[in-house]
Image (spheres, rainbow, N blue to C red):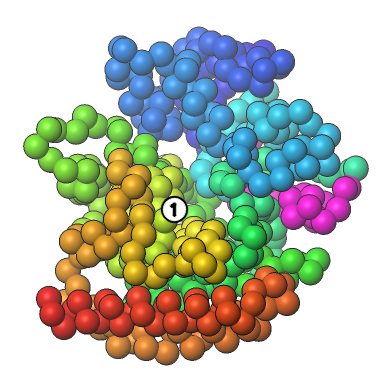
Amino acid sequence: MKCILMNKNKEIALIELNNNTNLIDKIYDIYNIDYAPLSFKVATQNKSINNVKALNNWYRGRGIPDWRKDLENLLNNLKINSPEELLNKSYALSLSDQYWIKEEGQTNLQWKDINFFTNAFEYKGYLDVSLSTATDSNIDLRSPNNTTDGMLQKAWIIDENNNRILVKGTYSPTRQEPINEWLVSQICKALNIDYCNYEIDIIDNKIVSKCKDFINENEEIITANDIFFSEKQSNNINDLNHYINILEKNGIKDVKKQLEDMFLVDFIVMNFDRHMRNFGIIRNVETLKWERITPIFDTGECLQCDKTINEMNFKDDKCKFFKNTNMNLSRLLDYIDITRYDLTVLNEIPDKFKEKLNKYKKYTDMSDERIGRLYRGLQNRIKELQNYKKNY
């Protein structure tokens, strides 16, 4: 069927959406390429790239990935066959941007009437099956939960203050991720670093993290991945400076300092999952102005959460750094001006972390030995950083 790809109230392109594959078969016309997803706009400027393929890559990428934990369970409970099928259940709307799809000729269908930033949605049934706690047969699929990325079980809800809140479950056997998210929030708060605040909660006897959506109905997140590959990289420039140059050219301020903040936090908590979809910028969809760098978010995969007690090592590990997906974590310090930070504010953080680990022990099933290792490991990371600053 013929559909129009929209960005809020702007028509971007007329496309053919296949009802069987739930993917895009053809692009008939492009109306407002400047308002298109950045990766698609870049593709249209490169004759060697198939535009339909590029648009489908973007479209599939906004849906639930094939590697989502307990995906088969989720699909069975939702009574659908594939994540792509979910994309078309509610106009492909998301709470990370303002893109959506409507059938050609639906002139009475308006973004203001259907978007999930300002319109309510049912979420209880979706939340239950996302956390694998129920098998509700009457789940309303008109939901932003059709377009959630990442491997963790997750669902959007609406709190008592009408905020859109992302609830995330766990992936590792340790069920440590929600406490890690909380920990990073405390570190960022102490260091006065911009961050997405995470809190810990218990839902149906499962430990989860909660965070408020950090964009509004006039904004979209553009990932570092799309930004990095939006321009050709010169042979004489490294990945970091290539990325910084693009952001500065588009008006983002204090880029280097904010990236240093992210590297610093990742070093402290040994974050191994800072891939290029886990940071980026926020763009205004009305003015197309690149407003600011995203706050630090999605840092649950850290502090050896995927390791057994015997495997845990708080000296060094591997991390992702732009195209380098196997860099020594210690090398992050090469990209940080450590003199900017008062690291004494972190002295009480390990005790607070240990307190949380013990408080939620029955929900994670962590042993006292593991909790002790985590406590001492975080202490050592902070001390190592403080000693590095003394000798800088």
* Image quarter in which the C terminus is found: bottom left
Residue indicated by mark 1: 273
On the image, the x and y values in percent for residue 96 come to 53, 47
Callout 1 environment at 10 Å: few (<14), some (14 to 19), or many (20+)?
A: some
* Image quarter in which the N terminus is found: top right
What residue do we see at 66% from left, 21% from top?
Answer: 22
Q: Which residues are magenta?
A: 110-136
Q: Quadrant of residue 268?
A: bottom left
Q: Quadrant of residue 224?
A: top left
Q: Judge whether 308 appears above or below 26 on screen.
A: below
Magenta span has 125?
yes
What residue do we see at 78% from left, 52% from top?
Answer: 132
Q: Judge whether 43 appears above or below 324 on screen.
A: above
Question: Is 84 on the left or on the right of 183, as rendered?
Answer: right
Is residue 168 visible to us here? no
Magenta span has 279?
no
Q: Nearer the viewer, residue 337 or 378?
A: 378
Is residue 150 visible to us here? yes
Mark 1, secondary structure of its residue: loop
On the image, the x and y values in percent for residue 207 come to 69, 68
What residue do we see at 71% from left, 16% from top?
Answer: 19
The amino acid type, in three-letter code, at marker 1 is Asp
Q: Nearer the viewer, residue 250 or 199?
A: 199
Question: Is 275 on the left or on the right of 235, as rendered?
Answer: right
Q: Judge whether 38 appears above or below 277 on screen.
A: above
On the image, the x and y values in percent for residue 172 come to 61, 58
